[in-house]
């Protein structure tokens, strides 16, 4: 007699959506609201926290090749198969944080905040360019979790969530503009018994926003302008002040949970300090390089673009 082992459903699928609303929420941020009947199947159990999705962006003036099964269902190895698709049909994939999910009389909506930035000549930023040119009705493909495919055996990381504080009562949140949506979402879900610090470094003071949180986490905004501070420098200085080196009388307990996301080199510097000098437990923290200066794409896996442009590549 033979037995079969049921394969758990793959938690991701491709959702065909369209732009429903566009709102500029700062000089460098554009909020795009997506809608579509298929979004009734989108989501995760509980709060979204730092839920990351992928946006499939077409090359200019080109249609996208179909992705996944007939209904968009994905499978292990889908990304490798996507990489094998020839351009221009392959398009580009970029990662973003879900800002909000709403149920309305017309259906579900998803908010995504895009960083809109100047692009150096010869260096493309497909997602920023797409968001800057998007209009109501523009189609898009979101790759994210399918609620019905998520089971008790599904790891959070498989759905796009990395925030796992493991009951910590003290947290440290730090990020540049690419992490603002995630930090905003995390703070909105924190309970009253959680304290700590949140540092957000952006280009311009006009990009500061009010963040609602029921926690006692202290939120500090940092702006590189008008003093032209180096990228990541303000984050580094603020964290060193808030989290002293191990052995000092004000050093934090080891169970502080740190969540850091920014340009890859900045994250490397902050991780080295927090783990090696401040004594935070790396197994209870999350460090994510969301993008790399001089590379087009996400994190440390981006594609080199030659001479480093002094802009984000997203």
Image (tube, rainbow, N blue to C red):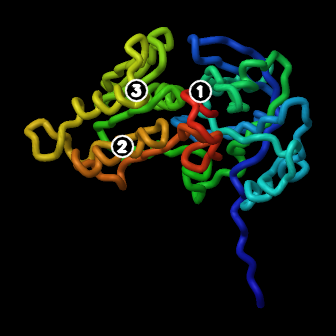
Q: Between residue 239 and residue 281, name the one nearer to us.
A: 239
Residue 230's tag is 3
Residue at image point 54% right, 28% down: 310
Q: Residue at x 58, y 31 (%)?
A: 309
Mark nearest the camera among 2 and 3 is 3
- Hey, which quadrant is residue 178 in on the image? top right
From what the image shows, is residue 158 above or below residue 239? below
SS assignment at label 1 = strand
Q: Quadrant of the N terminus?
A: bottom right
Residue behind mark 2:
269
Disc nearer the start of the sequence (1/2)? 1
Residue 134 occupies quadrant: top right
Q: Secondary structure at mark 3?
A: loop
Few, some or many residues within 10 Å of mark 2 (<14, 14–19, 20+): few
Residue 66 x, y percent position in the rendering = 89, 46
Front position among marks 1 and 2 = 2
Between residue 101 and residue 51, name the one nearer to us: 51
**Left or right of residue 163: residue 217:** left
Who's the residue at 72% across and 37% down the image?
A: 55
- How far is the residue under mark 1 from the one under mark 3? 27 Å
- Which of the two discs, 2 and 3, labels the residue nearer the N terminus? 3
Q: Secondary structure at mark 2?
A: helix
Which residue is located at x 62 percent, y 45 percent?
Answer: 304
Q: What whole-number distance in Å separates the C-alpha atoms at marks 1 and 2?
A: 27 Å
Q: Are marks 2 and 3 in contact (CB under 8 Å)?
A: no
In front of the other: 158 or 306: 306
Estimate the x, y position of residue 225 in percent, counting from the top left.
43, 14
Q: Could you say where residue 177 lies in the image, as x and y percent from the top left?
A: 50, 26
Residue 98 in picture, x, y percent from top left: 61, 31
Q: Hey, which residue is sitting farthest front in the picture?
A: 307
Indicate which disc, 1 or 3, sits on the residue closer to the N terminus. Answer: 1
């Amino acid at each position: 007699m033979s037995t079969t082992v049921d394969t758990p459903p793959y938690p991701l699928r491709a959702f065909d959506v369209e732009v429903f609303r566009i709102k500029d929420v700062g000089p460098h941020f554009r909020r795009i609201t997506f809608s579509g009947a298929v979004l009734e199947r989108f989501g995760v159990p509980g709060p979204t926290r730092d839920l990351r999705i992928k946006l499939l962006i077409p090359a200019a003036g080109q249609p996208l090749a179909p992705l996944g099964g007939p209904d968009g269902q994905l499978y292990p190895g889908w990304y490798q198969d996507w990489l094998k698709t020839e351009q221009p049909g392959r398009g580009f994939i970029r990662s973003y944080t879900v800002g909000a999910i709403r149920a309305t009389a017309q259906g579900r909506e998803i908010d995504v905040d895009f960083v809109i930035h100047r692009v150096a000549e010869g260096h493309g930023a497909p997602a920023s360019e797409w968001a800057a040119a998007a209009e109501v009705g523009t189609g898009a493909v979101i790759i994210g979790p399918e609620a019905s495919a998520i089971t008790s055996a599904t790891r959070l990381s498989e759905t796009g969530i990395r925030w796992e504080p493991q009951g910590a009562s003290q947290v440290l949140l730090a990020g540049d503009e690419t992490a603002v949506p995630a930090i905003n979402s995390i703070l909105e879900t924190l309970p009253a018994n959680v304290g700590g610090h949140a540092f957000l470094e952006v280009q311009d003071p006009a990009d500061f926003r009010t963040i609602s949180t029921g926690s006692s986490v202290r939120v500090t905004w940092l702006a590189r302008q008008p003093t032209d501070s180096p990228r990541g420098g303000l984050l580094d200085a603020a964290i060193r002040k808030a989290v002293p080196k191990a052995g000092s009388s004000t050093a934090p307990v080891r169970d502080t949970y740190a969540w850091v996301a920014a340009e890859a080199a900045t994250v490397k510097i902050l991780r080295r300090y927090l783990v090696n000098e401040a004594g935070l437990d790396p197994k209870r923290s999350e460090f994510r390089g969301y993008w790399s200066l001089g590379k087009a794409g996400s994190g440390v896996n981006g594609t080199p673009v030659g001479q480093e442009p002094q802009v984000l590549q997203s």
